[in-house]
Amino acid sequence: MPGSSFGKLLVLSTFGESHGPAIGGVLDGFPAGIKIDEDFIQSQMDRRKPGQSKISSQRKESDQVQILSGVFNGISTGTSIGLLIPNNDAKSKDYDHLKDSYRPSHADRVFQQKYGHRDYRGGGRASARETAVRVAAGALAAQIIPKVKIQAYVSAVGPNSLDPALDLDLSQIDAHISRCPDAATAAIFEEAILKARKSGDSLGGIISCRISGVEPGLGEPVFDKLHANLAKAMMSINAVKGFEIGSGFAAAKMKGSEHNDTYNDRGERTSNNAGGVEGGISTGADLFFRVAFKPVATIMQDQQGLNSEGEPEIIKGKGRHDPCVVPRAVPIVEAMAALVLADHYLLNRSSKI
Amino acid sequence: MPGSSFGKLLVLSTFGESHGPAIGGVLDGFPAGIKIDEDFIQSQMDRRKPGQSKISSQRKESDQVQILSGVFNGISTGTSIGLLIPNNDAKSKDYDHLKDSYRPSHADRVFQQKYGHRDYRGGGRASARETAVRVAAGALAAQIIPKVKIQAYVSAVGPNSLDPALDLDLSQIDAHISRCPDAATAAIFEEAILKARKSGDSLGGIISCRISGVEPGLGEPVFDKLHANLAKAMMSINAVKGFEIGSGFAAAKMKGSEHNDTYNDRGERTSNNAGGVEGGISTGADLFFRVAFKPVATIMQDQQGLNSEGEPEIIKGKGRHDPCVVPRAVPIVEAMAALVLADHYLLNRSSKI
Amino acid sequence: MPGSSFGKLLVLSTFGESHGPAIGGVLDGFPAGIKIDEDFIQSQMDRRKPGQSKISSQRKESDQVQILSGVFNGISTGTSIGLLIPNNDAKSKDYDHLKDSYRPSHADRVFQQKYGHRDYRGGGRASARETAVRVAAGALAAQIIPKVKIQAYVSAVGPNSLDPALDLDLSQIDAHISRCPDAATAAIFEEAILKARKSGDSLGGIISCRISGVEPGLGEPVFDKLHANLAKAMMSINAVKGFEIGSGFAAAKMKGSEHNDTYNDRGERTSNNAGGVEGGISTGADLFFRVAFKPVATIMQDQQGLNSEGEPEIIKGKGRHDPCVVPRAVPIVEAMAALVLADHYLLNRSSKI
Amino acid sequence: MPGSSFGKLLVLSTFGESHGPAIGGVLDGFPAGIKIDEDFIQSQMDRRKPGQSKISSQRKESDQVQILSGVFNGISTGTSIGLLIPNNDAKSKDYDHLKDSYRPSHADRVFQQKYGHRDYRGGGRASARETAVRVAAGALAAQIIPKVKIQAYVSAVGPNSLDPALDLDLSQIDAHISRCPDAATAAIFEEAILKARKSGDSLGGIISCRISGVEPGLGEPVFDKLHANLAKAMMSINAVKGFEIGSGFAAAKMKGSEHNDTYNDRGERTSNNAGGVEGGISTGADLFFRVAFKPVATIMQDQQGLNSEGEPEIIKGKGRHDPCVVPRAVPIVEAMAALVLADHYLLNRSSKI
């Protein structure tokens, strides 16, 4: 089935495996007349690329995006944008031992069951390498909605969490390699990740995202609620296990009289438990949501997996992996959010005459 | 924009407002040759309909679904299925006072901002009444995949939660009006809901869903991951604020060595932290996910809202509402799950030659 | 598969069989704020309905459309519009003999082959009765683009054609029951149709369509060329076998130096061989296309068909059919054109910033 | 708007301009387990590429397709297939004079009107160069349905037509550079094209297409009729002005008693006026359709166009163009047909249980 496309009016279709010659995609429905900031695109790529810090995978990819069409003399033409990112540092040899082996909590086995034939090198299509294309496309999408400011950051790593009472300075997100804006917490996160790496283990984490500058009216009443599409966008990122918006799971514990975002005497909402959406439509308040990532499945420890005959088999951790994905996943979350918001921005143009 | 459709090969398109003459929809892509069990459809409708117990809204709707096409002599013909559910007990007078008023945490204001003109009666299109069509369609969808067993139940109401250590007998879900399968907890839930009603307040809650009998291979690697589409489906239900699958948000706190679903010596997975999906594709293990609902926004207390001039205005609670939606939302969760699974079942037919 | 939907931003999904209780549909993506002219809708329905003249089928259907949602106080709300048209004069008895018989050039046999189970009454889903919903939806779509004037008319009936050199007065289309605007030719067409009826036979014909007031820029460069979507729209109407735009098949015989629409000294195109589209995008000139209809397959003569055992069987003409569909198909062509143009009008809103 | 995608389950998304660095696309929904014949793909590319004979454009493009993903060890994996075709011989200098000029019957002016900014080099996105990607994708699609034989050929060039009474040997299509299977007529076509080139003019033409081996049941009853999707596919090819299936426009002149495909005493259809579809669904008989192409707009003669100020301007023919596109368009027609048929083949897998 065609599951490699995302969006309705702004549609990203991606291709590519972890160890093929290149990954890439087509971003279709991008409006004409937008001056393209290629530096911004590359800067987002650099935030996602491996090898960027001591807490990330040591695979070396320059991740230079080639824009092959849809932009002429630096301005978008309204036609589909071709994106190409060569794979330079694919070490396929690292994966020969996986031809007939299924790693635990990886997609190896289900791919084999579903398709009967798979590219086993580095996770193939299931590799998070695919998200590099999303980051490029998201950085383009963000340029459709320049007033919208999307800021994701790491708010938990393993059992350690950012104190929700802290007053965060979101300009400091990239001041720390863990992409946590609070210096003290960032240090804890980084230490935890380094410790996990040393012990050959991995850690889960949470990314929070705050989006300001969203005009009221984006999102549609029934199935295409803004937060429903954000949820799908985030849950489609590798390793994500949960999504919540505004009050989220905490809402379940509350009374209506506590949870309702009532108005004060100046006609302003006194709270934003909604997280910026009412009835699936943006209110104009900040969007706020959280995304839970499981720990990376590849660890540098022996684990019992399965072979293609259905027999248990010890799998040894190989390859170059992140001990914790959330620092590098921050630009991916931002990219998916930008794709959703730009799409809904375009869709909303037809909501009234 | 066309946001009233859901699905790729099995597509539900709905229409209808809370206080219009009828709601309904078209279910397209339903395969031919399926003997339709209309009793099952109606039984699911009855589980959702208002007025079913002392803890639900007292609006009286028989919610008899008319199947207008696509079924001939009791068997599906492969053509689109027309669904119609008349609105019988719409008391629009209850809503006249809302013409120029925006209730807090309702969609009144954003609809006005988005469309400039709205049907203010009973929430109009934003009303959860629309979900009746989903329940009918979901009950049809379930008949495409008879081996799949979808069982949702209430696992939290306000601050009260089902003990996760309990061994649940899911055959007892409907033995209690709260749709919690454990008798003792069900009693607590019901008491909490009645107490909330008495105090003119409302409560949030959580629905858990377990799905067994899903063959391996459903779901697609990239954007159309099975759990991404489930997340969108659930987040599109009124009042939902969070979704998690398998280990969910708890995964964020874990190490890879704890979280990985390794295999035992018989070649079986020893855990299901995945919640039944790896790489977005069903593993054959039970799907397990949880959905968080906020407390109903309408409460029988005075609250400060806004009028159409942007001035604060006291809104009095009127209309017939549920103090807690989760008991009635159980069949809605099941319906959306059935739509997603039946769609992916059909989509998977083209995954290999 | 879900083949009962049409459009991208303005999406019509239909349901219903010829002899079921009702036909109908959902028109989704209709912008808010449009004052709905229900009289215009009904007048288009009346132009399509059977029994309207001595040259049409004598089935009696009032074809009163019920608008069940999406319009409040006479103005569109931006939410999906539910459409319902009851079947009043379905005489299913006329079709009992077709349960195990396949009429020549009807869809009976292929439906049985495709689905294994079919509603054989009156063609079931393959009946042109379905087009009544298209006419209602098209009349709504036309109200999104009030400056666009869509005028279809009959330009050929069997071997008789309207002289292309005639200067037509398109206000006279409905002055004649054949819907040919030229009185003399209309008389010839009507006589030919009556003669065909008398001899128990049927006739094919051609509908021409001229559309003025289309702004430049509608249509997309590659697959969604305006005329490609018009072609699909028209070819999806029952009995249509051919479509051409502008110079059409005659273009194949021409030289570039003859065919090119060059500019005169005032900067105006001196011809419109393009038929109003260049590169799939509207030029602002009138759109002009022609649609070929085959003769109605049901004739009041014995013909050799097939039975469900694969044996030849004499089929007798029964039921109430048109000897020539083109007069009644005029509003169907207009409706499909309106759906395409309104959709592209909305889509074009996102073509530039 | 996203108009660069085609198909429902087998979806081709293309990108690329005539004079950018490369064109390419993503073919998504391709089933796993198909041994890919790359020679066949390249052979179809070679049939389309410029410079292949004395009657085609002299632009030199090797048109080597790179398959970047979705195929592993020569077998499809079920994941999206990335396609890349570098532009080697783009002579953009030839087009500098067109920056502020609109050629007659080209898309220059409408692109400017629609987008406000365009890549004017060689027609940009409106160039038929984009169809190279379609040919590659179509050659892949054909491998999904190996029993289906798609054979297109040139049946008219300018005023010269293939005699319909001839008994054609379709194995001879490529024996002649005009791709007309009849030697005598092929000679006439080639002479006509050479004569047009010499006079600096161009010619239109017709491509006929016969498809055998199509199982009954492909196509859907209402909007997605097989021939409606074929019509859209063909009309989306550059320069196409008309489409007809089976009896086509000739059907309009016929009586039902002549046109109906009745059965003989052996239960076989005695004719195929339907062209292989009844009610939009394949009958199992050969599909037969015809596609009309206008003469190429670029001619080597002075013509009056327009400049960007709206003033008339003499346009001189430059660039390397075909005097008649139909010989090179044969593989494009076949490719689009293969995409439609493979898509409907996959879609039909969900038509019954």
Image: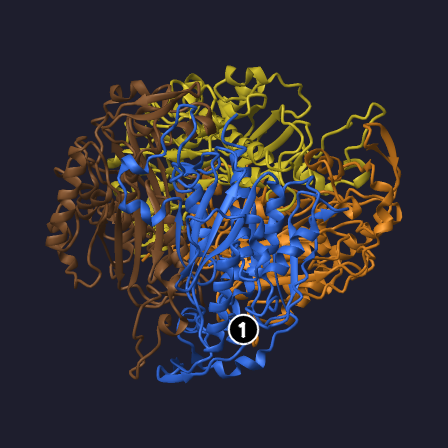
Chain colours: A brown, B blue, C orange, D yellow
Dot 1, how many residues are within 10 Å of its Cα: few (below 14), some (14-19), or many (20+)? Answer: some
Quadrant assignment, res B107: bottom left
Nearest the eye: D179 or C97: C97
Quadrant assignment, res B275: top left
* Disc 1 element: loop
Q: What's the chain of the residue with tag 1?
A: C
Looking at the image, which residue is at 60% across and 52% down? B137
Hey, which residue is sitting farthest front in the picture? Answer: B184
Nearest the eye: A238 or C60: A238
Q: Please give left or right for residue A245 compared with residue D140 in the image.
A: left
Q: Please give left or right for residue B10 compared with residue B302 in the image.
A: right
Nearest the eye: A158 or B174: B174
Picture layout, residue B93 above or below residue B218: below
Residue B33 at what x, y percent from top left?
Answer: 69, 39
For residue A4, say whether it is visible.
yes
Looking at the image, which residue is at 46% across and 74% down? B298
Picture layout, residue B206 above or below residue C227: below
Picture layout, residue A107 above or below residue A334: above
Q: Residue beneath label 1, please?
A: C35
Residue D108 at what x, y percent from top left?
Answer: 36, 47
Quadrant where the C terminus of chain D is found in the figure:
top right
For residue D118, say whether it is visible.
no
Counting the numbered discs, the total is 1
Looking at the image, which residue is at 49% across and 52% down? C8
Residue D60 at what x, y percent from top left?
Answer: 32, 24
Residue C17 at what x, y percent from top left?
Answer: 72, 51
Amino acid under disc 1: Lys
